[in-house]
Amino acid sequence: MIEQLKKDHVINTMIKEHEHILVMLDELEKISIDLSDYNKNKGMSLMARANELAVKVIGAEPHHKREEDVLFPAMEEKGLFGPIQCMQKEHDIMREIKHDLKNETKNSNKEWKDQVDTVSQLISELCGTLRQHIDKENNVLYPMALQFITEDRKWEEMKEKCDEIGYCCFCPLDKKELDESLQNN
């Protein structure tokens, strides 16, 4: 069903954004592992990169806003409330973790080991929660939306609203552009 969607379909764009977010999570997890192997002098560049990635993940806010203000209400119009409440709650949890990670990766007042432990824990929480969330959206929520919202005109209206909200700083890029963008950072 998803494979048949136009390239600029609301759902396709959201899935593409998820692909970009997952690549950033992969890098964050690698940084978390590498941080434990370095002293403060060597590890500060990793901490700075973790901060950059936290800022980029926070930059996915337009993605959440489009879901919350466009997709979720359209699904609720079709009587789908439970999955929406779950996703909304997870958005709130992830917002807090993302901001905590951004703040902790800038905080140099702590002992290095304490900072590394805190940052590693936040990365683990964020990556675990966000990966599960993306999986639920890609494999349950989005197919459900496509099953229940069947009117082309409704999707066109939703696309217009999404365009008004805007898109993530890193999307929409295709896979090749994503790889090039990450290599340049």
Image (cartoon, rainbow, N blue to C red):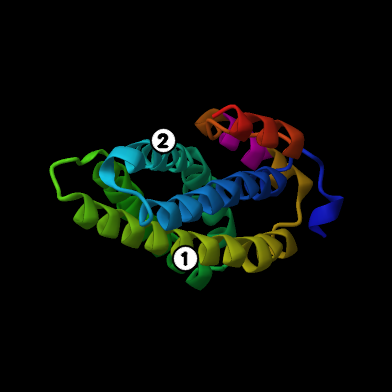
Q: Quadrant of the N terminus?
A: bottom right
- Residue at the far left in the pictured view: 109
**Which residue matches tag 2?**
52
Q: Is residue 78 left or right of residue 128?
A: right
Residue found at x 53% / y 67%: 132
Which region of the structure is painted magenta?
A: 157-163
Mark 2: secondary structure: helix
Earlier residue among tags 1 and 2: 2
**Which residue matches tag 1?**
128
Q: Is residue 42 left or right of residue 22?
A: left
Percent across and percent down for residue 52 are 41, 35
Percent across and percent down for residue 46 are 40, 41
Percent across and percent down for residue 119 are 31, 54
Mark yes or no: residue 8 visible.
no
Q: Of tags 1 and 2, which is closer to the observer?
A: 2
Query: For the residue carrying disc 2, how many other residues have a C-alpha within 10 Å: few (<14), some (14-19), or many (20+)?
Result: some
108 over 126 or under it: above or below? above
Residue found at x 71% / y 31%: 177
Mark 1: secondary structure: helix
Amino acid type at image mark 1? Gly
Q: Quadrant of the C terminus?
A: top right
Amino acid type at image mark 2? Glu
Q: Label 1, label 2: how many angstroms apart (C-alpha)?
A: 19 Å
Q: Nearer the viewer, residue 159 or 61?
A: 61
- Residue at the far right in the pictured view: 4
- Residue at the far bottom in the pictured view: 82
Residue found at x 25% / y 38%: 106
